[in-house]
Image (cartoon, grey):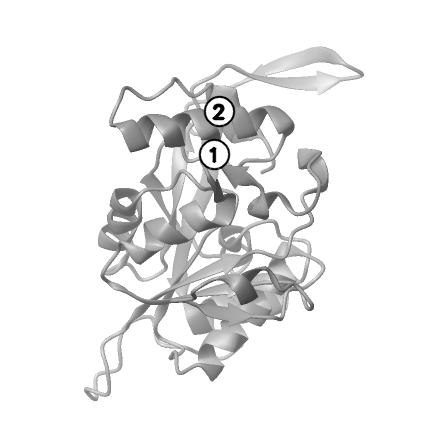
Amino acid sequence: MTDYPKNPPADGTSDPRFWALIPCAGTGSRAGSDGPKQYQLLAGQPMVMHTLAAFASVGRIANTAVVVAEGDDFFASQIATYLIANCGGFTRASSVFNGLEFLLQQGAAAHDWVLVHDAARCLITPGQIDALIDACAADDVGGLLAHKLPDTLKSEVAGRVAGTLDRSDKWLAQTPQMFRIGALADALRLAGDQVTDESSAMEALGLHPLLVPGSAQNFKVTYPEDFALAQAVLIARSRGSALPMTPSTTGLKGE
């Protein structure tokens, strides 16, 4: 494994920058939608555009790269202020790994930070992104937004309760997840395609990412009923009205 520096070089070459990477190559098979779910309309815009708008509002982000499947021409009709990487893989891990290589080709440095975020977590806010950067920028490992598990957790055997698990140390992993580009690329190269998030790859190296409190509303739109809830939240935000309650179980979906 390449020994990438945890902190910026001491020779004054550059301070680490912050990049965003949005894997956007999924097919949306669980959403029951006609075509990739990230392009379905929510509150008048394709879902992914809400996601990109949040990152565009964070001044510290140097640039955002969107990883799409080869042949995906959705962004050809968009006025792009972000980078489009036509290198999506068959798994999330491969799409992220390919996207990291793309960022390095675009001038990112191995010691720069990358914030990897699900295209379908369209309710992320600039404030939450800034909170993650503030918490992790001085950390040796990096970290992720996560939500403390609020519900009683059961184990199951053959459709029946087998036990009640202690939830006191349980968190729902969310995104963005923020790590050094070089370190994350190495971790994914070693972990392979089986990991479902970037933190898992870093954990496989024996590292312990920082848990940064997120929000129950930062859920991943995965199933048909999630679309109505996400739309209600987006409409409420646009009107400045009270936000609808987000069922705590929603965060469990699609993780």
Q: Quadrant of residue 217?
A: top left
Residue at 65% across, 63% down: 72
Q: How crowded is mark 1: few (under 14 residues within 10 Å), some or many (20 or more)?
A: many
Q: Do the residues labelled 1 and 2 touch (CB within 8 Å)?
A: yes
Query: Could you tell me residue 138's position as x and y percent?
Result: 23, 60
Q: Mark 1 vs mark 2: which is more N-terminal?
A: 1
Q: In this orientation, which residue lies closer to the viewer: 11 or 229?
A: 229
The vertical placement of 61 against 215, above or below, is below
Q: Work out which residue is located at the far left of the displayed protein and give it.
A: 12
Name the residue carrying label 2: 229
Label 1 secondary element: loop
Q: Which amino acid does label 1 sit on?
A: Phe
Task: Judge left or right: residue 191 versus residue 79.
Answer: right
Q: Tell me what residue is drawn at x 51 percent, y 45 percent.
A: 46
Which residue is painted at 31% across and 62% down in the image?
140
Left or right: where 47 falls relative to 236? right
Q: Which residue is identified by label 1? A: 219
| Viewer can see residue 24 | yes
Horizontal and vertical percent position of residue 185: 52, 70
Mark 2, residues whose alpha carbon is within 10 Å: few (<14), some, or many (≥20)? some
Q: Is residue 136 left or right of residue 154?
A: left
